[in-house]
Amino acid sequence: MKTGTWYVCGFVVAFIYFYVYAVNYVRGEPALSGYNPGVPPWPTSGQEPRAQSRIQQAIHPKLSWQYHNYTSMTTFLRHVSTIYSNLTALYSIGQSVQGRELWVMVVSRSPYEHMIGKPNVKYVANMHGNEAVGRELMLHFILDLVQNYETDYYVRWLLDNTRIHIMPSMNPDGFEVASEGTCQGGQGRYNSRGFDLNRNFPDYFKQNNKRSQPETEAVKEWIGKIQFVLSGNIHGGAMVASYPFDNTPNSIFSSVVSAPSLTPDDDVFKHLAATYSLNHGRMYLGEPCKVGAPKFENGTTNGAAWYPLTGAMQDYNYIWHGCMEITLELSCCKYPPAAELTKFWEDNRISLLQFVGEAHKGVKGFVKDDSGISIEGASMKVKGRDVGFQTTKEGEFWRILLPGIYTMEVFAEGFQPREVQFAVIEQNPTLLNITLYGDNTNRVDLQVQPSNIDEEEQPLEEEEEEDQGSTIFGLPNPLTSIQNSMRSILNKIPVFG
Ligand SMILES: *[C@@H]1O[C@H](CO)[C@@H](O)[C@H](O)[C@H]1NC(C)=O
Ligand SMILES: *[C@@H]1O[C@H](CO)[C@@H](O)[C@H](O)[C@H]1NC(C)=O
Ligand SMILES: *[C@@H]1O[C@H](CO)[C@@H](O)[C@H](O)[C@H]1NC(C)=O
Ligand SMILES: *[C@@H]1O[C@H](CO)[C@@H](O)[C@H](O)[C@H]1NC(C)=O
């Protein structure tokens, strides 16, 4: 060949090389290394192929409409928490019997730090390992929140003002032995020692003799550390939003016919259940899963009216920690085929978002002493609603209430008890800062002043004394009075036979 031809060939080859290089560079692919498409266009020496593909995925976290076992769920959660490190934090509250982590993803503008004055809420799914829909919906919910933060006004407001703690699986061991497509039955429902975790919590009405399981202990410790305002406990096998109480004091009649067992916050619980149900694609229709089963009006029910049970997580949340938890039954089939997951997501997305927002209704504020120092562990109670709650380390409190006029009762060791009246409106939570003054007068003085003992203050005094006699895990129990008043009512009911 002539020298000129060599030049032309060389030029053409060089041109093609640079052209392909440029195209691949723009597309973010490696130049001329077709056998390894995962390599990014920046220096990669020393990187494992696995790390490379992780970086590629990392740019757009995706979640398939499949069920995710423990390994792939863990990978996904780690992944999201790395990519959205400004909006998420992944933590574990402990381990299952078989050593799987009990993951919680907190999604918030402030994932690593509590925002003073702003509420914490939670969702816990899959405590029955074979009730699998909620577990997958939680993964999609996490992704939906972080991906819509920039564009969706409501999501942004929610994450700016709330810390949402999401536990996709409280029973990861059970899930691993459950099987897709199995609608009924108990395979995978229990933890690996055979315990039903939703019968494993301390019970307010009856002695619970079930041995406490590691998964239960982890949750108890968790909700003892963070003051959750609102919670959803996600199940399957029915289609209804069920609210406390799950158990009932009336053991004689409950075996014959299920009667409602209502809390003093029944109006609020009904509202919370309805918020979920009415925003749902079809829960509000109240259609029973089985032919002949009762219809649920508005897709809601009281737990005990449906069927009473001992050791439920929702009663424990409410009684022990003042957290309003309801139980959300999201699918008639406990573990439906993955092909149905998109439909479940469409039915539940708005409900999941709206329910969380209810944490911003009612009253909130701080309890301080007269020099402005926060009072931790002050016992609070809305008058007429004898289930109490306590202030946090920063003296904060929150209570969901419907619009109306209320009186807050506050008492703390070493301070004079106080009652403060306030109003709640529909749109915004009422801000209520309460100052407590040192208890310089002793109790005898209070009692000899008749003007101090009116009908309203009398119960307060009684309760304080009872508090000291009764403790839960070493903490004063502000709820003894409701128990005692229930007992006294029950004692008055004649028992025949
Ligand atoms: C978990 O799921 C992944 C992806 O589907 C699969 O590769 C893996 O074998 C599964 N692990 C177990 C223990 O089943
Ligand atoms: C995270 O927040 C910091 C500080 O607000 C900001 O500089 C950074 O760009 C954010 N990162 C992402 C990935 O959004
Ligand atoms: C169902 O909803 C309607 C309309 O909101 C309400 O009037 C009714 O009391 C609700 N029933 C129950 C049982 O919650
Ligand atoms: C209540 O106290 C908090 C914390 O000290 C303060 O930030 C807030 O402005 C107070 N609100 C009112 C209405 O006084």
Image (cartoon, rainbow, N blue to C red):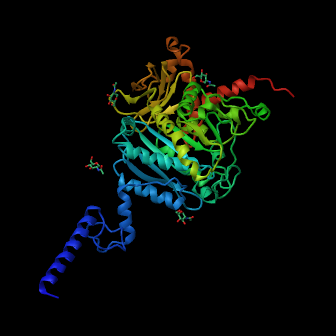
Q: Residue at x 27, y 71 (%)?
A: 31
Direction from residue 287 to residue 460 in the image, left or right: left
| The residue positioned farthest toward the left in the image shown | 4
Q: Where is residue 298, by image quadrant?
A: top right
Q: How far from the left and from the top, in percent, is residue 178?
A: 64, 57
Foreground residue, 212 or 259? Answer: 259
Q: How far from the left and from the top, in percent, is residue 16?
A: 23, 72
- From the viewer's perspective, is residue 106 above or below residue 454? below
Residue 206 in view here: yes
Q: Residue at x 60, y 44 (%)?
A: 235
The quarter of the rendered structure image containing the N terminus is bottom left
Direction from residue 306 to residue 397 in the image, left or right: left
Q: How far from the left and from the top, in percent, is residue 102?
A: 52, 54
- From the viewer's perspective, is residue 13 above or below residue 101? below
Residue 248 in view here: no
Foreground residue, 478 or 86? Answer: 86
| The residue positioned farthest toward the bottom in the image shown | 1
Foreground residue, 35 or 395? Answer: 35
Q: Quadrant of ligand 3?
A: top right
